[in-house]
Image (cartoon, rainbow, N blue to C red):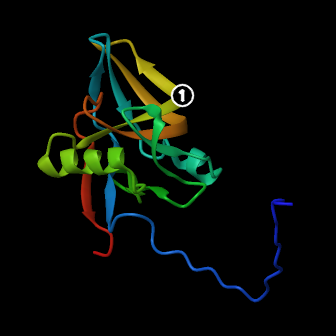
Amino acid sequence: MNEKEKRIFTLSNIEIRAGTEGSSQVIEGYASIFDSPTMIGDMFQETIAKGAFAKSLMENADVRALFNHNWDYVLGRTKSGTLTLEEDEKGLKFRITPPDTSWAKDLMISMQRGDINQCSFGFQVVRDSWNWDIDPAQRTIQEVKLYEISIVSLPAYEDTEAYVRDRFT
């Protein structure tokens, strides 16, 4: 009788320690710069006002960091602690602890070369204002609901920034 055998052991007082996540590098930068106008589709000029992200961040929104707005490539997430976001005087500052994956490593190589070094963000406008008395019209976004930030190769806002640096510096 060659039956399959199964053994179950009860273990107690076991301690599991995980090493640090993946690489010793992080991705940091600004996903949005305040009071910096940009043209949107040759139709109007848009500016993000200081404080536009404050309520969304205060409500502990579960924001993801993506590559090129692609939800298949999650670099970090606020809920897991691999993405931190804060507003400062300059804009929406972020820090990502990227996963130890081949595509994340490839992205960081492109960033270190300077090929990819800018950002974008996915959002819903909660409150804005328009000035139709100038040409092109001026839109000021005063409050957003933030869903994601992205490291991108083609940003709408040229003055955003992203860079790779050593995690412990």
**Does 141 sit above or below residue 163?**
above
Quadrant of res 36: top left
Query: x, y (%) of residue 51?
Result: 48, 46
Residue placed furthest toward the left: 113
Q: Nearer the viewer, residue 46 or 12?
A: 12
Residue at 34% across, 64% down: 23
Counting labels gives: 1
Query: Would residue 70 appear left or right of 55 to someone viewing this image?
Result: left
Quadrant of res 43: top left
Instruction: Quadrant for the C terminus, please.
Output: bottom left
Residue at 34% across, 44% down: 103
Instruction: Quadrant for the N terminus, please.
Output: bottom right
Q: Nearer the viewer, residue 124 or 47?
A: 124
Query: Would residue 146 appear left or right of 159 to someone viewing this image?
Result: right
Residue at 71% across, 85% down: 14
Query: x, y (%) of residue 67?
Result: 38, 38
Residue placed furthest toward the bottom: 13
Q: Amino acid at mark 1?
A: Val
Residue matched to label 1: 125
Element assignment for label 1:
strand
Query: x, y (%) of residue 148?
Result: 49, 39
Q: Nearer the viewer, residue 11 or 139?
A: 11
Query: Would residue 59 appear left or right of 47 to someone viewing this image?
Result: right
**Does 90 sit above or below residue 66?**
below
Quadrant of res 115: top left
Residue at 22% across, 43% down: 117
**Does 24 sit above or below residue 10?**
above
